[in-house]
Image (cartoon, helix red, strand yellow):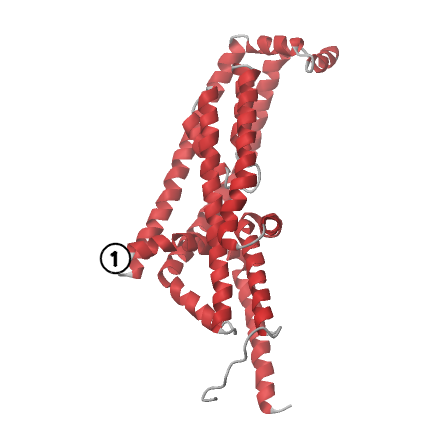
Amino acid sequence: MDRERIIQVFFFGFLALMAYELYALLSPFLMSIAWAILLAFMAHPAQLELRKFIKSRTWTAVIITIAVATGVIWPAIWLSAKLANEAQTLIAQANDFVKNGGMARVNDFMQSSPYLAPILHRYGGAGVDLNTDGPKLLMQGAQGTSEFLIKNLSGVAKNVVAAIIDFSIVLMVFFYLLRDGEDYYKNLRELTPLHDDDKAVVFDTLTSTLSAVMRGLLLTALMQGFTIGIGLLFTGVPYWAFLAVLSAACGLLPFGGTAIVWGPAVLYLGYFSGWTMAIVLTIWSLFWIAIIDNLIKPLAMRHGTGLPTIALFFGIAGGLEAYGPIGIFAGPAIISVFASLLRVYRRTYAGTRKPRRAAGGE
């Protein structure tokens, strides 16, 4: 083995070792870095528009970072205050409900129901009276919940602190990606050992895929929030506007989705307004969710990715299983890049690319 070969083996072995150590160093922050990259990608068009007026990349990055932080922090504070207020209102209504004979009305409703009456008779035979034991059970449940919260308060506080730290890391990485991300992108592209046209295929495919997935998710989430809000307004659910916005936010979640909002609303309508309106809201919600998820979302995401609908489905489902929520973007991106690499292979190694002439050759 000549000296040059020894140098190459040592270099690539040492490079692999350092790459592994780098992964070990960054592994606790990989999810935060991934979200920062995704946010920077989403904010890049806005940065380009802002740089038409502000030439400094640093100041444009500062402005957009502050805007993103404000857009997350203030809604979180407002939502927390809103939920706390609603929780207090709900507790007061529950107390009034119990004091005004609400448990007796629930008992009468269960006695007249062909589905719930057998269950009530079974517990009645066991010596359980809903009228007398119901409020006691409610108080015991509330006391148990309070004790659970007190015991786990330190864990909740730790989770809050961890979330704040993760969010701070995301913002920091987000800022540097906005400021220097174009240089990182160019350096990564130059390091890729492919021909220029092959690099264009791979990187352009990745860019178009991420854009299409984000566009599809945001569009469908807004449409779901709008349609669910109309259903809530028509059926008379209180705070329908707030719940519509919450539905749009839940539409971005990989699991549960808008059912987190309209499911409890159906139960609310079933008890306070009758099951007719509850069934109307259920049918309305399921109808529009089916159309948006099965027709509009695949069409919106497919435009730009070039992937078949079945490949897009497995990309999203497999990405969620492998990477968690960020797999919504990572899964389709991996499939799209793999498909682009297959096209590069067909052109380069399958004999479909024309041979390149040497410099100065005829």
- Find residue 187 and report its horizontal and vertical position in percent: 43, 70
Q: Quadrant of the N terminus?
A: bottom right
Residue drawn at (47%, 18%) of the image = 92
- Determine the residue located farthest toward the front in the rendered image: 362
- Residue 352 versus residue 309: which sits nearer the camera? 352
- Find residue 31 and report its horizontal and vertical position in percent: 52, 54
Read off the residue under disc 1.
54
| 259 lies above or below 118 | below
Number of residues whose C-alpha sits closer than 10 Å to that of mark 1, classed few (under 14), some (14–19) or many (20 or more): few
- Find residue 98 and report its horizontal and vertical position in percent: 54, 12
- Determine the residue located farthest toward the bottom in the rendered image: 2
| 329 lies above or below 186 | above
Residue 91 seen in render: yes
Please state which amino acid type lies under the numbered disc 1.
Ile
Residue 131 seen in render: no
| 158 lies above or below 25 | above
Number of numbered discs = 1
Displayed quadrant of residue 294: top right
Q: In the rendered view, does 37 fall on the left or right side of 318? A: left
- Residue 245 versus residue 332: which sits nearer the camera? 332
Residue drawn at (57%, 16%) of the image = 275
- Residue 251 versus residue 312: which sits nearer the camera? 312
- Find residue 169 and report its horizontal and vertical position in percent: 44, 54
Q: Find numbered disc 1 in the image and state the secondary structure of the residue it sits on.
A: loop
Residue drawn at (60%, 69%) of the image = 346
